[in-house]
Image: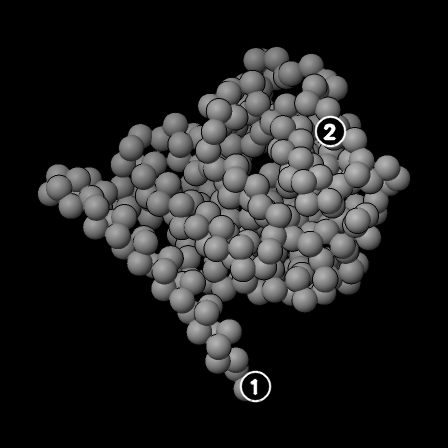
Amino acid sequence: MRPAGFVALGDSLTEGVGDPVGAGWRGWAALLAAGLAEHPVPFTNLAVSGAQTHEVLESQLPAALALRPGLVSVVIGVNDTLRCTFDIHAVAARLDTVYSACSEQGAVLLTACLPDPGAMLGLPGALARPLARRQWAVNTVVHALSERYGAVHLHACEGDWITDRALWSADRLHPGERGHRQLASRFHALLVRHGLATGPAPSPEPELPAPTRAASLWWLATAGTGWVARRCTDLLPQLLTLAADEMRHRARGTSARLDLRASAAVSAALAALSVGERQPDPA
């Protein structure tokens, strides 16, 4: 089966940050598009750096549906975990709506669970664990909804690729060219297994030399610093509060309560979606 077209939704990961080509970004989705069939498949990348699930729902989804693609990738959620507004109930509801709309139009869904940003950045435990819990919650929701809608799902939240620095860019949150190529290759293998890709697999070998250490440091000192600052302004005060709560529970030996609280929130969010399916809004 040859996809009628491929549309990619998401944030900077799908936009291609970390894989520069000319004055812009390429990324795993563009690399994957080239291998979907023996002949070119129409490809549109709607992903925007910094996007959260509400932006995918409100802005990217309508544009995607208008194109009536045969394949839609939805890889999103990390930016939600980096905001003080994080709410797994809202994230689950938005993803459910996006997945449902694409499936109802007949598109094949491509999804992925992702590493937690605290671990990638090497944050201290008290700061990292709250982010890990949030990313675990998002990944659990993505797993459940991917199964519900029959998505082609890539388990990318763990494995050797996360710790291989050669696959990551200077900011430690975005893959470099090698990392994007690995993601594209893994997605391609899944699509081949499902009979949804007939073109050549993306090459794992980079076309361009890896950035020098000086170039990486320059990126961090300019664009990278701004990226971190914008997110810290929003997240840092709450993250410090979460870290203080983490340390209090650890001192009391009650850290397990935080994990149970996160599990209960995910279960409630998924249960609410199931209730919504059984009792549709008459309006």
The mark nearer the N terminus, 1 or 2, is 2
Residue 280 pos. (x, y %): 52, 80
Could you tell me which secondary element the residue under label 1 belongs to?
loop
Figure check: 263 above or below 169: below
Q: Which residue is mark 2?
A: 202
Where does the C terminus fall, quadrant-wise? bottom right
Identity of the residue drawn at 68% across and 23% down: 204
Question: Which amino acid type corresponds to the residue marked 1 in the rendered image?
Answer: Ala
Residue 160, can we see it? yes
Figure check: 9 above or below 164: below
Could you tell me which secondary element the residue under label 2 belongs to?
loop
Looking at the image, residue 239 sits to the left or right of residue 23; the answer is left
Check disc 1: other Cα within 10 Å, few if <14, some if 14-19, many if 20+: few
Residue 1 pos. (x, y %): 79, 49
Along the line of sight, the residue nearer the viewer: 66 or 54: 66
Furthest residue to the bottom? 282
Along the line of sight, the residue nearer the viewer: 149 or 134: 149
Identity of the residue drawn at 63% across and 28% down: 182
Residue 236 pos. (x, y %): 37, 42
Along the line of sight, the residue nearer the viewer: 273 or 201: 201
Q: Which residue is mark 1?
A: 283
Identity of the residue drawn at 69% across and 36% down: 188
Identity of the residue drawn at 43% across and 63% down: 270
Q: Is disc 1 in contact with disc 2, using a CB cutoff of under 8 Å?
A: no
Looking at the image, residue 188 sits to the left or right of residue 258; the answer is right
Mark 1 or 2: the one toward you: 2
Residue 220, can we see it? no
Residue 41 pos. (x, y %): 83, 44
Furthest residue to the right? 39
Question: Which amino acid type corresponds to the residue marked 2 in the rendered image?
Answer: Pro
